Image (tube, helix red, strand yellow):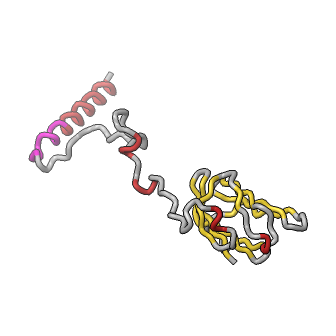
Amino acid sequence: MPGTHSGRAALLAAAAVLIAGCGSAPQEAAAPVSTPPSPVSSSPPPSASPSATRSPSLTATPLPKARNGTKLRACWDAKCEVLVKDGQSIRLADKWGLLPIDVTVENGSVTFRTYTLSGAQLTMGEQTPNQGGPSTVNDVNFEVVAVKGKRAVIKISH
């Protein structure tokens, strides 16, 4: 089988060239032969704790300090900035024409529900910070400053 012998000879010659080529270059200049690097894993090593690998941008930022703290009574005159929790109610003076305002805080937004003194139901739903301005009812502005979980800093003004 003449074709098989010449195929073996070519293969042996190619192997000899490769082996000779690897040993002919100085060690500093030779490119290291290695397996390709494994892809970078997006998950932390098993020994690392999740808090150690969390980036600063993902850490929770606290709510800003409300000027009137948690004192909802400060809103009586429709001028306050308070920290509210989901389920709380805010009372304004009767001159503003609104019954107690129920506050719902969830999913990064605040919903205000109330009735006018004449019985009309009002809902300002899913108000968020930076929505382009406050919602206004009876010349009273309702603005969401910040939301975190079931708490929010809101501002009421006129």
Q: Main secondary structure of the magenta part?
A: helix
Where residue 65 appears, as percent x and y from the top left, is 50, 64
* Residue 10 in which image quadrant: top left
Residue placed at 40% from the left, 52% from the top? 55
Tell which of 61 and 80 is nearer to you.
80
Is 78 left or right of 149, judged from the image as shown? right
Is 138 situated above or below 91? below
Residue 99 is left or right of residue 5, and the answer is right
Q: Residue at the spot x=9%, y=47% of the render?
A: 26
Q: Residue at x 16, y 42 (%)?
A: 21
Q: Is residue 25 magenta?
A: yes
**Residue bounds of the magenta highlight:** 19-27
Left or right side of 112 for 59: left
Image quarter hosting the C terminus: bottom right
- Residue 75 in the image: x percent, y percent? 66, 68
- Which image quadrant for residue 81? bottom right
Whole-percent x, y for residue 53 in the image:
38, 45
Tally of numbered discs: 0
- Name which residue lies at 16% across and 40% down: 22
Residue 139 lies in magenta, yes or no? Answer: no
Q: In screen coordinates, is 118 left or right of 8? A: right
**The N terminus, quarter of image:** top left
The spot of residue 11 in percent (x, y) is 27, 32
User: Residue 66: which quarter of the image?
Assistant: bottom right
The furthest residue to the top = 1
